[in-house]
């Protein structure tokens, strides 16, 4: 049980570090942390959607759409669905 708890904190921690980096405009660091989260939990929908935000912030709209669609396949969260319309 302790291992699972620690593992869960690891991917959430990486995602939160990515959120912090994104908030200050450091997209390279944000992307690295989101990818680290996905290494720990490959289907973590928040990290996948956050990669979409990084892509959109960099002007890669097709890449952003791909990431958001991937996130929606895992969890059809209205926030992720709405984000698909934002880059357009």
Image: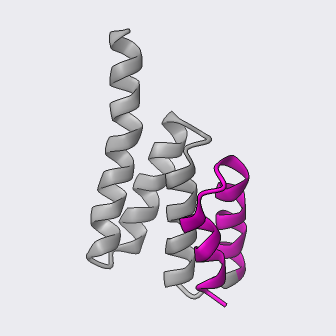
From what the image shows, is residue 32 above or below residue 26? above
In which quadrant of the rendered view does residue 25 lie? Answer: bottom left
Q: Which residues are magenta?
A: 62-88
Residue 41 percent across, percent down from the top left: 53, 36
Q: 85 or 67, which is in the foreground?
A: 85
Does the magenta stretch mainly form a helix, a strand or a loop?
helix
Q: Give the farthest residue toward the top.
A: 1
Q: 85 or 16, which is in the foreground?
A: 85
Residue at point 49%, 83% (across, down): 57
Q: Is residue 8 left or right of residue 68?
A: left
In which quadrant of the rendered view does residue 6 lie? Answer: top left
From what the image shows, is residue 26 above or below residue 29? below
Residue at point 30%, 66% (across, down): 21
Q: 62 or 72, which is in the foreground?
A: 72
Residue 19 percent across, percent down from the top left: 34, 62
Q: Is residue 57 left or right of residue 84?
A: left
């Amino acid at each position: 049980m302790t291992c699972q708890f620690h593992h869960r904190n690891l991917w959430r921690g990486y995602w939160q570090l990515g959120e912090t980096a994104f908030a200050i405009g450091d997209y390279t660091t944000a992307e690295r942390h989101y990818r680290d989260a996905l290494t720990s939990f490959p289907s973590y929908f928040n990290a996948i959607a956050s990669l979409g935000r990084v892509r959109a912030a960099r002007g890669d709209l097709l890449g952003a759409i791909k990431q958001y669609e991937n996130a929606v396949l895992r969890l059809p969260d209205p926030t992720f669905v709405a984000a698909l319309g934002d880059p357009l």
